Image: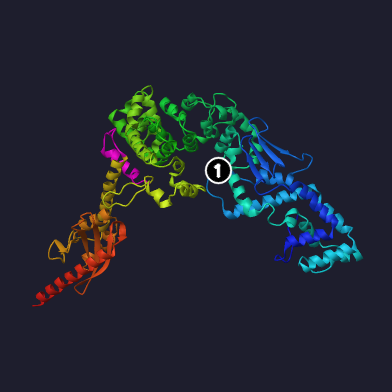
Amino acid sequence: MEPFVQKNVGNNHQQTAQKLLIISVHLKQIFQDQWFYLKDVTAQNVLKIDAENKVLCIANGMWNIHFNMDLPLLQIRSDFPNQVSDVLAEFILYEIPFFTGSLLPQHPTTVKTKAQVFRQSLIEQVFAWVDGESRVEQYLYNISVKDAEKIDQLLIAEGYYDAAYLTAFAKYGKEIPLEVELNIKHLCLANSVKGESFIAIHELIPIYDQLCFSAEQFLPFALFRILKTQFMDSFHLMDVLERQQDFQLLMSHAVEQPHLMGFAKLTLRGYWQNKDLFSKQNFLNKKCPYWDESQFNFLPILNYQRTVNWLFKQDSVVIDWISRNMLKPSVPIAITALSFVDTSKIHPQVILLTLKYFRDISARLFVSECHVYAKEHFWFNHHRNTKYSLDSEMSKILHTQYISNSVLYLEEWMDLLQLVSEGNSYIAKYVFQKLSRVMQAYMLFLQKIVDGIDAELVPYINPRTHENRDFFLVLQKHQLNVSEFRHVFHHSALNFSRRVSVFDSYVADYLVDFFLSHKEVAKSVTWAGLFQQAIRWHQQLQHDTTLQKLRLRIHVEEWTRLSPEKYMYYGDWKFEELHQLERIIHESADFNHCLAVAYSQRMVDGEYVAFHMTSVQEPSLHLTLGCLYEYDQLVLEQLKYPNNRNADVHSLNIARLFIAEFNLILRQRSVEEQR
């Protein structure tokens, strides 16, 4: 039907529609014929799921969409099979998204618009069933002068149009404008007569929104697994209809091995009917024809039976992610390393987050270990290696490929390890040992945190899930706020270091250097211990980087201090003037602020003075005091705790009193120098 064209949108549309039906018995009958179908439909039953029978019920069962594991996978059955339902069917099949991977909330405007369109599609579908448009047209073209005058009087008064068009037609045969005809048709619709309370939009919106995230409830489990893995974010029911022949080929696999369904997208459709599609040997066979080689830079999928065995034991939440990321060579590295440790008592979400954390860094660590092990055990002289050389000149002589310890040669190192370790899994285990142990340390560290929270919160431990639609509802249920929940997943601060999320790459950045400086990694290594080492490494790195940068413009190591003593005291506080370049850099690195970079030059030039301020009563209390030096006097500019946190009032008062006393010393010194 054409859009509603009422000119005065402020009019009471429902009252006008009801008055119109009082005038015309013919138009009233058109409404009553619609109401026969719609009288029992409410916002609560217009979209309803029968989870037990796997049915999506539309309009209180006026239409029922049945989902099956056999063809057809989807059937629309109507209580009125002789009626055409193309308007509503088009919306249901094409317009409603059912989310699989994306759990982000839909935009409120989008949900409201879709709910409104669905409601209007239902109403217009029923209007078409009663042949409403033709009947209104027939009535208008046979309208009596009496009805025409009454309807003109009503609709002109209510602002729908401004001239007696119906009367002119009834008396003189003048053409009725299209907008007049459309207005009357719209006034005959069920929602015009019953008003906004009929399938109220504000009630329908949350029901429609919830339906979009409820596919798992109305789909058979096997079919849902197929759709979840074939459509990463969302699907429409038309996708099911269009590809049901394909999905039927996968149905037996989805029943027998549902957790492996993610790998179907990496295989060729022509082999989907094969019973051994997900055989373990296919993951180890370089020449397996099932895999879609156009998607892979490397085959086989995995190199070791142990890794395949580990993979097959994992939960679908882990395998789904692996299958989506398997084309990145670093992912097989990470899962191979993890397969050498016991994960049987680890929550799937923890395993998943461990793989995600090490997804990128694992490639660098693996290449580093391979390079060291290759030189120690003469891999390039191995009788099975006829493909690679570590020496560029030798590679030219032997016609082999030159490789280095760069991650750019990751696939070549993977291949070389497979060549020399064939039949000897001990070699592979040794190469992966250090990586396996640090991954295990992270995994156990995270599992210990997870053990302390409610199971309902575990799916939200990944910070990226904090935007999901149900996250805040779950937090409210457990009487937590966001900051409290996130605080659980932070490392305990060491000394004055900033708080670091366990998902931050802070420790991962340190691991390359850690591997180079540690020939062995003990079984007892802990992630908390690695974090403490990482803090010192980051501080030293910051120190070295800052020192290198400052030495380009500052050519002195220290300068004369203003303080008469190395340490000065005021009350229960100790003050140390910072007048050495390395000492200032350490202050910045240890307490995580910008003193060295921003103020070193001004200190050398005699324009700025900084002190380290420590409480004698509480030795753990440290601040950095910065002062301008003008006309032989100090002026307080800033006082900061570690991590640039502003000082409290008490500490500021102590600093001001100290500066006042220090300025007295400076004035006395100035007087003595003038004598």
Instruction: Residue 398 in the image: state x and y as whole percent.
Output: 36, 29
User: Residue 41, relative to residue 614: is it above or below?
Assistant: above
Q: Residues within 10 Å of mark 1 (few under 14, many from 20)?
A: some
Q: Residue furthest top?
A: 423
Vertical placement of 438 versus 427: above or below?
below
**Figure quadrant of the C terminus:** bottom left
Residue at (79%, 47%) from the top-left corner?
A: 129
Q: Which residues are magenta?
A: 504-526
Q: Is residue 487 left or right of residue 537?
A: right
Q: From this viewpoint, which residue is outermost toward the left? A: 675
Residue 525 among magenta residues = yes
Residue 633, position as x, y percentages in the image: 20, 72
User: Quick check: 315 left or right of 582?
Assistant: right
41 vs 283, nearest the viewer: 41
Q: What color scheme is it?
A: rainbow
Q: Nearer the viewer, residue 69 or 323?
A: 69
503 within the magenta span: no
**In which image quadrant can residue 650 be found?**
bottom left
Residue 404 visible in the picture: no
Secondary structure under tag 1 reads loop
Image-based side of 7 in relation to 256, left or right: right
Left or right of 304 in this view: 521: left
Q: Quadrant of the N terminus?
A: bottom right
Q: Residue at x 23, y 56 (%)?
A: 621
Residue 351 against residue 563 in the figure, above or below: above
Residue placed under numbered mark 1 in the picture: 233
Asked whether 222 or 514 is in front, the reply is 222
Image spot of residue 333 (x, y percent)? 40, 34
Q: Amino acid at mark 1?
A: Asp
